[in-house]
Image (cartoon, helix red, strand yellow):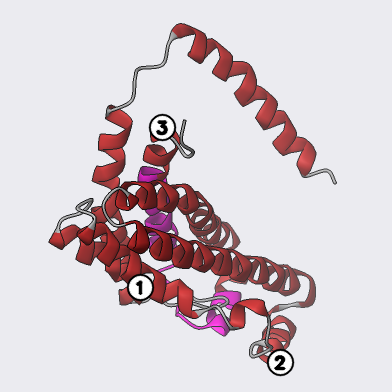
Amino acid sequence: MRFPNGWVGGAALIAGPVLLLAGTLLRSPFHFFFPDQLKAAAEHPGLVQAAYTAFLAGNVVMWAAVAYLAQRIGVRSPGWAAWGGVLVTVGLFARTFHAGVDQAAFSASRHLGVTQATELVARGYGDLHLFSFLSFTIMFGWYVLAIGAYRGEVLGKVRAVALATMGLLPLGVLKGTEMLSIVGTVGLCIALVPLGIRAVRAQRRPTRKNLLTAVPVALGLGALAVLSTLG
């Protein structure tokens, strides 16, 4: 059996783009650059936390969506599938790294105040790290994957172009929403959500045994999630 399978990949193709779009729209009322993002987090902590959490969750879920899409592309265009899958996945890792820095900056804002946190972020904004050298993957990977999806006959021309618009999404630490952010995440939904729905519908319906097994597994995972916050 391939991993991710149709259930995992299909669900990710639906949930990933929707979460990214939700996070993008939730932070759209605030100005794009980091001083305004830190100020917004202080003035509207619940909304900003929800926005950044939704975007991070969507970014993490997208690895399974990309892996499943690359499997489909690889049937006809294995080279494009490999390069597109690797580049986009590395880009997802980079955005996850940025999200960690975002969280640290918001924490500094709560404990030190907005002014000091803004000065701290400004001083270290240009510091080099591993993903400084790999940031091109965040944008460029989507173009390669979109070409592969079209050449592999997984997506038609319009939805392949929609997938490529994710390459327009701004990158970096504490970046808010601008018009290109909305274009990119809406394009991602147009490209992948219908594919995810078809993938899920193509799966066999869960048996009663599957459903009964899922309940204790879900409860166990929930308990582990709570325990994880204690350490």
Task: From the image, state whether disc 3 or disc 2 is nearer to you.
Answer: 3
Identified by mark 1, the residue type is Gly
Which quadrant would residue 103 be assigned to in this image?
Answer: bottom right
Residue 98 seen: yes
Q: Secondary structure at mark 2?
A: helix
Q: Position of residue 46 (x, y in %)?
A: 57, 57
Q: Is residue 83 left or right of residue 212?
A: left
Amino acid carrying mark 2 in the image:
Arg
Residue at mark 2: 123
Residue density around tag 2, few if under 14, some if 14–19, many if 20 or more, within 10 Å:
few
Residue at image x 38%, y 47%?
Answer: 71
Query: Residue at (23%, 50%) from the top-left corner?
Result: 154
Residue with the most extreme right position: 231
Residue underneath mark 1:
167
Looking at the rendering, which quadrant does residue 215 occupy?
Answer: top right
Mark 2 / mark 1, whichever is N-terminal:
2
Magenta residue span? 13-39
Compared across the picture, whether 43 is left or right of 161 comes to: right
- Residue 225: horizontal and vertical position, in percent? 70, 37
- On screen, residue 208 versus residue 189, left or right, reads right
Task: Tell me the distance, in whole angstroms, between the alpha carbons under discs 3 and 1.
Answer: 27 Å
Residue at 43% from the left image edge and 10% from the top image edge: 207
Could you tell me how far apart the alpha carbons at marks 3 and 2 are, in whole angstroms? 45 Å
Residue 7 is labelled as 3
Query: Are there few (<14), some (14-19), or many (20+) residues within 10 Å of tag 3?
Result: some
Q: Residue at x 44, y 50 (%)?
A: 67
Task: Give, as a three-letter code, the residue at label 3.
Answer: Trp
